[in-house]
């Protein structure tokens, strides 16, 4: 009797394992992560080792000597070179940026196995986000906005007719500040009221500091245009448009310190 009970238990346990496993494997991917892969596969173990070293080093000493939201690293010799960069909003804490980087490096390896170049955009929370990118050449300082993604709020209700000109004026008022930058930070923010109700909207623009002012301006123009078509023109309450070199974000909820 005891032996039969054990067999029944093992049978039921096996059935549970086989039923649960496919469900776990098929869980939908989080909507707050978008990965893009590029180029062919690498075949060198040395490249894979350099990639691990580069990605793992990004989250270390992110605030040394001073936190700017941008960091780059490079490992290996030509043929096995890995250059990796990260960009976080400068208003978040360095430790939150580091946490986002750690999660992103795991995702980029998982989603782009063996790829020579890839980028991942991760939203940890409404405030904390980051972009992690690597390539098999010196990507730092070279403008190549090959990947563009959008995130938007499912919530609509913005007054499109009033928001459109306000958004245009806000972009024009801070774009030059973001392009010029200072202290290694290409970032600018602004808030404004619009419409009869005086509803407030918040906007931020940012570029990686390694590209030229001309390329930063070009990137932000594309980001603002994409933000308009993917958010403003649809009456969305918030949206983001991001690339390998810049991003634009607006929201009717404050997401950066006013001061």
Image (cartoon, rainbow, N blue to C red):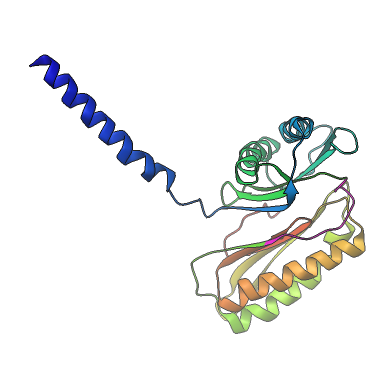
**The one of 16 and 140 positioned closer to us in this rendering:** 16
Residue 140 sits inside the magenta stretch: yes
Q: Is residue 251 visible?
A: no
Farthest-out residue, top: 2
- Residue 11's image quarter? top left
**Residue 5 covered by magenta stretch:** no
Please give left or right for residue 208 compared with residue 230 in the image. Answer: right
Q: Residue at x 72, y 73 (%)?
A: 225
> 18 or 221: nearer the eye?
18
For residue 224, which quarter of the picture? Answer: bottom right
Residue 138, horizontal then vertical, whole percent: 88, 45
**Residues drawn in magenta:** 138-148
Regarding residue 230, the answer to whether it shows in the image is yes
Q: Residue visible at 67% across and 74% down?
A: 228
Q: How many marks?
A: 0
Question: Picture coordinates of residue 101 (x, y %)?
Answer: 67, 39
Residue 2 placement, left or right of 44: left
**Residue 202 figure quarter:** bottom right
């Amino acid at each position: 009797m005891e032996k039969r009970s054990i067999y029944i238990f093992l049978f039921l346990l096996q059935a549970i394992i086989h039923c649960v496993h496919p469900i776990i494997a098929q869980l939908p991917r989080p909507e707050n992560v978008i990965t893009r892969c590029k180029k062919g596969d690498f075949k060198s173990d040395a490249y894979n080792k350099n990639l691990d070293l580069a990605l793992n080093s990004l989250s270390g000493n992110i605030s040394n000597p001073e936190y700017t939201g941008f960091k780059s690293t490079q490992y290996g010799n030509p043929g096995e070179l890995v250059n990796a960069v990260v960009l976080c909003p400068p208003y978040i804490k360095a430790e939150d940026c580091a946490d986002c980087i750690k999660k992103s490096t795991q995702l980029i390896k998982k989603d782009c196995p063996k790829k020579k170049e890839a980028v991942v955009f991760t939203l940890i929370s409404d405030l904390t986000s980051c972009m992690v990118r690597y390539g098999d050449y010196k990507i730092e300082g070279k403008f190549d906005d090959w990947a563009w993604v959008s995130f938007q709020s499912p919530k609509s209700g913005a007054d499109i007719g009033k928001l459109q000109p306000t958004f245009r004026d806000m972009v024009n008022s801070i774009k030059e500040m973001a392009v010029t930058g200072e202290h290694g930070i290409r970032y600018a923010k602004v808030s404004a009221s619009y419409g009869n109700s005086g509803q407030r909207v918040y906007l931020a623009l940012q570029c990686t500091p390694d590209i030229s002012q001309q390329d930063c301006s070009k990137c932000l123009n594309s980001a603002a245009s994409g933000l308009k078509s993917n958010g403003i023109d649809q009456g969305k309450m918030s949206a983001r448009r991001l690339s390998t070199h810049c991003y634009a974000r607006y929201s009717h909820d404050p997401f950066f310190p006013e001061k």
